[in-house]
Image: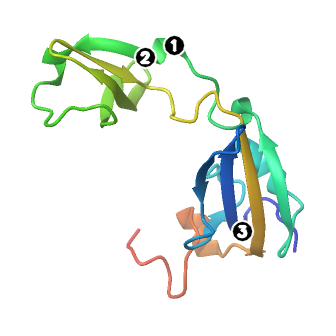
Amino acid sequence: MKIEQNKVVVMHYAVSDSEDTLIDSSYDHSPLAIIHGTGYLIPGLEKALVGHEAKDTFEVSVSADEAYGQRHDELVQTVSRELMQGVEDLQVGTQLRASTDQGEQTVIVIDVNDDEITVDGNHPLAGIDLKFDVEILEVRDATEEELAHGHVHGEGGCGHDH
């Protein structure tokens, strides 16, 4: 069975940057299980999966534009520390939720001093071309329940109420 829209795909992956620095891998734990075409994966990887089937292994390079997008300097902002009153333990790397003109957004603290805090609203992998090593373990039709819930169920269902 080939991967296409609404097929369940169970796969292992390893993702590296253009310098071959490993960013993440599923090989040392459970494989990833997704419903193809639901937007769970970055666009470049999702497109690369189409037509593959169980037991396929392949590499794919995904440009930043087809991954997490380009970096946008305007998403880096320095704000008064007073705006963060009540936020405990502010340090570099802290993730916060911020209200923006586009709605709620996750930002990461990249600099802290006595008076100001600098936050970055870019995804940590924005602007980075990625390389994936992929092993397809299983491809099957998604059940009606999985399609209705928008995610893959394990044995006995998804374990939560909808």
Residue under pointer 1? 73
Q: Amino acid at mark 3?
A: Val
The earlier-in-sequence mark between 2 and 3 is 3
- Determine the image quadrant of residue 104: top left
- Looking at the image, do the residues carrying marks 1 and 2 touch, with CB atoms under 8 Å apart? yes
Query: Quick one: quadrant of the C terminus?
Result: bottom left
Q: Secondary structure at mark 2?
A: strand
Q: Looking at the image, which residue is at 70% across and 45% down? A: 20
Q: Looking at the image, which residue is at 65% across and 53% down? A: 38
Q: Report x, y in % for residue 99.
A: 32, 25
Q: Vertically, is 134 above or below 79? A: below
Q: Looking at the image, which residue is at 59% across and 71% down? A: 146
Gap between marks 3 and 1 measured at Cα:
36 Å
- Determine the image quadrant of residue 95: top left
Tell which residue pokes out farthest to the bottom in this image: 156
Residue under pointer 3? 9
Residue under pointer 2? 76
Q: Vertically, is 93 above or below 121? A: below
